[in-house]
Amino acid sequence: MSGTFTVINPATAQPIREIGRATVEDVDAVVARAVRAQRTWAGLAPVARADALRRFARVVEDHVEELAQLEVLNSGHPIESARWEASHVAQVLNFSSGAPERLSGLQIPVAGGLDVTFHEPYGVVGIIVPWNFPMTIASWGFAPALAAGNAVVIKPAELTPLTAMRLGDLALEAGLPDGLFTVVTGSGSVVGQRFVSHPDVRKVVFTGSTEVGTDVAAGCARNLKPVTLELGGKSANIVFDDADLELAAASAPGAVFDNAGQDCCARSRILVQRSVYDRFLELLEPAVAEWKVGDPALESTQMGPLISASHRSTVASFLDDADVAFRGSAPEGDGFWFAPTVVLAQPSDRLAQEEVFGPVVAVLPFDDEADGIRLANDTAYGLAGSIWTENLGRAVRVSRAVKSGVLSVNSHSSVRYSTPFGGMKASGLGRELGPDAAEHFTETKNVFFATDAS
Ligand code: TXE
């Protein structure tokens, strides 16, 4: 270790703990242990790996409250959200535990023999995690990677390492072999970059900014290493004039202000058909006013603080020259508080194009279906989105035309462990979760067995 960094409670701005900064040599030692552990792990019977993951899921289930409280402390997530996140980790593990016994290959008809394919694990997988959903995003990488027979090395974000570190303890408590699941704390430029350059880390999973993700992908390309990227978003919530406007307006704050807008799937642009634009804003205003921002330890709280003082400055900078329509409320005093804000925007505005990653939503009008689709696709990103309409044909047409990886009609849901998740365009490469999650952590091997005597 080389020095430490301080973890801060974002709701109070008070320090919580000092955490060690790993060096390149530390990472290399962890990867060497992971290589050994992976050989043993991959050699176990599939049912033994499935059982081990089920045990891990149960241990996480038994610690949901502890993990949730830790996330409240370290990330400022409202307690009810944090409980959902901790339970979700157990569910992702549970879902993944079905994979070791179901990673079937093919038997392909060929002349002169038998041809079969195997899904071979990569070996060691490096997982680089951001600060916005520290537990859940880590689990989307580690659970299917382990299920496919890999070892994992996990680098949490410097701001939010505590739940990942605790999951590392729980993995050992559940009986996973030493070295199979290791959390390495430190900076992205040292630990994250070493995952990219280390010859024994054979796949990298990165979630974070598009800028750093592009750099990680370039490094992986130089090492001929596959990479999954989950990056930024500027997702559209498209409200047509035939929608249930009351429901669309009542649910819009949750779709963008959940986790204080620090969500890659945040519906941070609301596109409203011009004929119902004024009515929609009238309905949205009380819904934003009622959005409860405050102490994340309270069960009634819907939104906590932003993650850091510097992030709050970045978010605030988006309001320079913005046409603010109305704002909700936020506590005063210590902590990185920011009131939910609704802004009227033009398509070319920074607020309509760039990811704010804070509780700021841009509302823009559109004329008709074609115009709505054009506007929805008018950013570099393509992660999520919602379509509000009572017209089934329109729902189908628009959901096929919007270039995003994860869409929902008359709802804002994005994440289920059993369905694929990931972005198009600048929002990423590859998919996580869903039925194929474990297979994405394997390479296909083809073997031909000659049956004809030669
Ligand atoms: O992300 P970074 P930051 C967006 C969001 C946010 C902005 C900056 O707009 O405001 O990015 O957030 C590690 N090689 N998103 O600065 O820097 C880093 O240590 C390898 C959107 O936190 O991309 C951390 O573990 N790794 C996104 C992780 O990468 C490196 C979620 C993400 O950090 C590295 C997060 C390097 N050179 C931020 N540099 C989403 N949409 O979900 C840093 N890291």
Image: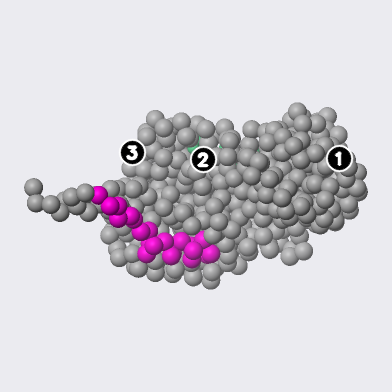
Q: Residues within 10 Å of mark 2 (few under 14, many from 20)?
A: some
Q: Does the segment drawn in magenta span residue 338?
A: no
Q: Amino acid at mark 3?
A: Pro
The quarter of the image holding the N terminus is top left
Residue bearing mark 3: 199
Residue bearing mark 1: 274
Residue bearing mark 2: 429
User: Which residue is more in the foreground, 34 or 256?
Assistant: 256
Q: List x then y, in percent, for residue 321.
A: 83, 29
Tell which quarter ligand 1 is in.
top right
Position of 188 with respect to 147 (left or right) is right
Q: Nearer the viewer, mark 2 or mark 1?
A: 1
What element does badge 3 sit on? Answer: loop
What element does badge 2 sit on? Answer: strand
The magenta segment is: 90-110
Occupied quadrant, residue 375:
top right
Position of 76 with respect to 39 (left or right) is right
Q: In percent of the image, x 36 and y 38: which residue is there?
A: 198
Lower sequence index among marks 3 and 1: 3
Q: List x then y, in percent, for residue 99.
A: 42, 61
Q: Nearer the viewer, mark 3 or mark 1?
A: 1
Can residue 163 be seen in this snapshot? no
Q: Amino acid at mark 1?
A: Arg
Q: Residues within 10 Å of mark 3 (few under 14, many from 20)?
A: some
User: Which residue is more in the foreground, 87 or 245?
Assistant: 245
Occupied quadrant, residue 79:
bottom right
Q: Amino acid at mark 2?
A: Leu
Can residue 183 be seen in this snapshot? yes
